[in-house]
């Protein structure tokens, strides 16, 4: 049965650039996935796709090359191991992301991410929103990713009495990047969900279709937005405390973390199964999809991280790579303007030692899915222009971080040759 695009998106499905093929995105709270779930995704990709998986910069996994007739069976196969894609795309609360998985506060952050994920996923009150609503939970501000969420939570205190979070709102990238602002400091963990509900309700009621929360703030201003949120019944509500066994799945990192780097977030199903085996052997059966499109594993306290790292190397995961976030671009995405993986290869080939130690990101369009404004050097494919031969080729803008906010564009509309020239100049 064929559905409208908006319905597919709510189920985490986009059409690919290639006719008759689809992509299925899988939501993972804070990027956490069990070894068994990873094997199930690998099996789905082999059975229904082309045996490849893509990791996003928000800690989700994507299976490409699916056919429409198989989508319902894919959904059932994922649900059988406790995975969901509902709200992974479209106008809904998206996957709850975290870029600080190696921090000491990650157990509390992971717990909060799971609670938010459970509450908002498939909740009809928070579907069919004007556009996406992104939530991130971070252990600290070092990665700046709290600045790009519709609701960004930063752990400010954690004790036996519970955790507290600073809440930033109305951030976002795309054509009009805007850093989020501090809405409220030291929000108790039991107020996080009701307060986020209040913010989402105001957003849904007053924002035109196709616009993010940042648009509403520009229209009505921060003061009026605060007033409207305060009027919502849930804004001051405090939920009962949660008790019981710990909810976090990943072992605390404690500096005992190994990372399997993946070029452009791409890996085969066989590689994912191999990483699941590593997780079972060394990491309590848990893998983490990182914001840099890699897989990390926190090594169990009783085991030797050096031996785990050697095991990873023996399996072909070499850590001598540049940190480079890369979206699918025109290889698979319908709005991609440049073949991002090929462009990134050309950039890496142009790098000297100084360039290789920087963090990089390239986005195949203005949507900035790889968060180029948060990399040391970010590259945005800004458009297509006709060259001397009459061919339309991509043009690139360069972003650089400056101060404590988002990176800003420092050069515009470069050809690929000009872009690689700038990289060689870095040394």
Image (spheres, rainbow, N blue to C red):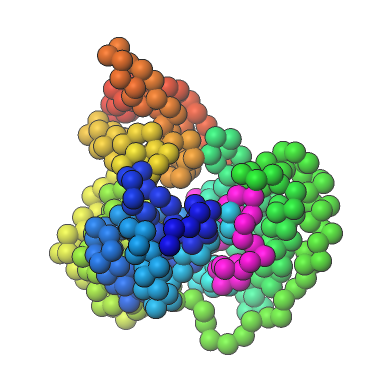
Q: Which residue lies furthest to the bottom in this view?
A: 244
Residue 372 in sight here? yes
Q: Report whether 237 appears left or right of 293.
A: right
Query: Would you identify the image quadrant in which residue 83 lies?
Result: bottom left
The question of residue 265 being in magenta is answered with no
Which residue ends up furthest to the top in the rendered image?
A: 388
57 or 62, nearer to the observer: 62
In-image side of 258 versus 228 (left or right): left
Residue at screen point 64% across, 54% down: 129
Image spot of residue 355 (x, y percent)? 32, 35
Q: Which residue is drawn at 58% across and 35% down?
A: 176
Q: How many tags in the picture?
A: 0
State the residue lying farthest toward the front. Answer: 1
Looking at the image, residue 313 sits to the left or right of residue 156; the answer is left
Q: Magenta stretch: give its range.
A: 117-143
Where residue 319 sits, quadrant-wise, is: bottom left
Q: Where is residue 197 in the image (x, y as percent from the top left)?
A: 70, 63
Q: Residue at x 48, y 57 (%)?
A: 3
| Quarter placement of the C terminus | top left
Could you tell me which quadrant the N terminus lies in? bottom left
Q: Quadrant of residue 379?
A: top left
Picture layout, residue 205 above or below residue 32: above
Whether the magenta-drawn stretch holds residue 121 is answered as yes
Q: Residue at x 72, y 76 (%)?
A: 239
From where the camera sits, is residue 312 visible?
no
Apparent side of residue 352 relative to residue 132 in the rendered image (left or right): left
């Amino acid at each position: 049965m064929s559905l409208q695009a908006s319905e597919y998106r709510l189920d985490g499905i986009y059409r690919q650039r290639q006719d008759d093929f689809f992509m299925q995105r899988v939501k993972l709270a804070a990027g956490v996935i069990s070894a068994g779930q990873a094997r199930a995704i690998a099996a789905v990709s082999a059975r229904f796709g082309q045996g490849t998986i893509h990791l996003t910069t928000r800690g989700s996994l994507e299976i490409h090359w699916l056919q429409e007739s198989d989508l319902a069976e894919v959904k059932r196969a994922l649900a059988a191991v406790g995975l969901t894609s509902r709200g992974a795309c479209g106008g809904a609360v998206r996957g709850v992301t975290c870029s600080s998985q190696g921090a000491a506060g990650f157990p509390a952050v992971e717990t909060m991410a799971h609670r938010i994920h459970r509450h908002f996923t498939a909740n009809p009150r928070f579907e069919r929103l004007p556009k996406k609503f992104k939530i991130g939970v971070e252990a600290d501000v070092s990665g700046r990713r709290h600045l790009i969420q519709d609701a960004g939570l930063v752990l400010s205190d954690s004790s036996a009495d519970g955790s507290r979070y600073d809440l930033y709102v109305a951030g976002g990238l795309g054509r009009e990047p805007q850093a989020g602002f501090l809405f409220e400091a030291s929000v108790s963990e039991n107020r996080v969900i009701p307060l986020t509900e209040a913010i989402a309700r105001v957003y849904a009621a007053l924002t035109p279709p196709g616009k993010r929360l940042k648009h509403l703030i520009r229209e009505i201003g921060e003061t009026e937005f605060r007033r409207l949120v305060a009027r919502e019944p849930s804004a001051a509500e405090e939920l009962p405390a949660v008790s019981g066994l710990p909810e976090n799945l990943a072992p605390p990192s404690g500096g005992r973390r190994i990372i399997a780097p993946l070029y452009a977030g791409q890996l085969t199903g066989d590689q994912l199964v191999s990483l699941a085996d590593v997780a079972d052997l060394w990491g309590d059966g848990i893998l983490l999809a990182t914001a840099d499109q890699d897989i990390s594993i926190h090594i169990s306290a009783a085991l030797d991280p050096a031996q785990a790292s050697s095991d990873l190397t023996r399996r072909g995961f070499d850590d001598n790579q540049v940190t480079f976030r890369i979206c699918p671009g025109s290889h698979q995405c319908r709005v991609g303007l440049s073949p991002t993986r090929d462009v990134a290869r050309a950039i890496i080939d142009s790098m000297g030692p100084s360039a290789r130690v920087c963090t990089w990101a390239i986005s195949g369009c203005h949507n900035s899915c790889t968060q180029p404004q948060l990399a040391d050097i970010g590259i945005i494919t800004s458009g297509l222009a006709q060259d001397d031969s009459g061919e339309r080729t991509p043009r690139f803008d360069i972003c650089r971080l400056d101060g404590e906010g988002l990176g800003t564009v420092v050069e515009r509309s470069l050809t690929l040759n000009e872009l690689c020239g700038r990289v060689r100049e870095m040394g």
